Amino acid sequence: MSVMVALENAKLKQLLERFVIAVGISLMLGIVLIGEDGREIVGSIVGIIMDPIIMLVGESNFHVMLFIMAAITALYASLIQKYTIDWDLMRSTQERMKSFQKEYREAQLAQNNYMINKLDEQRKEMMSDQMEMSKQQFKPMAYISIISLPLFMWAYYYISEHGSAALTFPFIGEILLTTPIIGPIQYWIFWYFITSLAISQVVRKALDIGGV
């Protein structure tokens, strides 16, 4: 009986996992395909939750809200990666790849055809391990997008309605967050990503993940 229950739980878990991944992939594709109007609709829906928070923070402190968002997504993303990626496999695979590349380069320099042929056979196994690494890295991206992309769409929608939000940057001075840096990339996006990156590094170090 317990075996049947375990099998049913495993099937349910697998079904939920596939559903979540499908939603994540849909969001990743949707942010491009749904267009401006679609992004605004998603942003306005997420605003039901986020607008009261920005009211507490203060509309003039949108950069603080972006910092809070960066902290939430960095923590969420790091936890997802910690528990969905086999970091021991990632480290061992990368070490094997480095060793393989070194041996292959030495065999080529020595023109050792026997060793080259032998290593070519091993390459198939290495490719299989790399595919497994890629699959493990893709799955967290789908999970992470479920939270991060709607938040990002809300920020995009909100800042488009509040173009007066500004922040003082070192060596630049006060500048509107909607000011473009390169192409469509505006300063609010730049601020969001540098804060997210900084917080992510601290969280990943604390959780001891990503050391490959």
Image: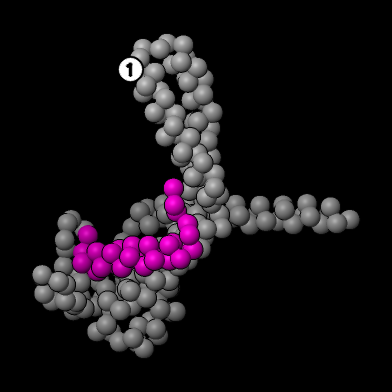
Residue 147 seen in the current view: no
Q: Is residue 71 above or below residue 21?
A: below
Residue at the (51%, 41%) spot, across then down: 92
Helix, strand or loop for the magenta stretch, by majority: helix
**Image quadrant occupied by the N terminus:** bottom right
Crowding at label 1, few (<14), some or many (≥20) Cα neighbours within 10 Å? few
Residue 134 seen in the current view: yes
Camera-nearest residue between 46 and 165:
165
Residue at the (63%, 57%) spot, across then down: 16
Camera-nearest residue between 43 and 185:
185
User: Residue 186's quadrant in the figure?
Assistant: bottom left
Residue at the (10%, 70%) spot, across then down: 172
User: Which residue is label 1 attached to?
Assistant: 109
Looking at the image, how many numbered discs can be counted on the residues? 1
Q: Is mark 1 on a helix, strand or loop?
A: helix
Q: In this view, does 107 lie above or below 196?
A: above
Residue at the (30%, 63%) spot, across then down: 193
Q: Is 153 displayed left or right of 49 in the figure? A: left
Residue 35 covered by magenta stretch: no
Q: Is 138 displayed left or right of 36 in the figure? A: right
Camera-nearest residue between 28 and 140:
140
Question: Mark 1: which amino acid?
Answer: Leu
Camera-nearest residue between 88 and 36:
88
Q: Position of residue 78 (x, y in %)?
A: 47, 62
Q: Is 154 displayed left or right of 21 in the figure? A: left
Q: Where is residue 188 in the image (x, y as percent from the top left)?
A: 24, 69
Colour option used = one colour
Q: Where is residue 102 in the image (x, y as percent from the top left)?
A: 39, 28
Magenta segment boundaries in residue numbering: 185-212
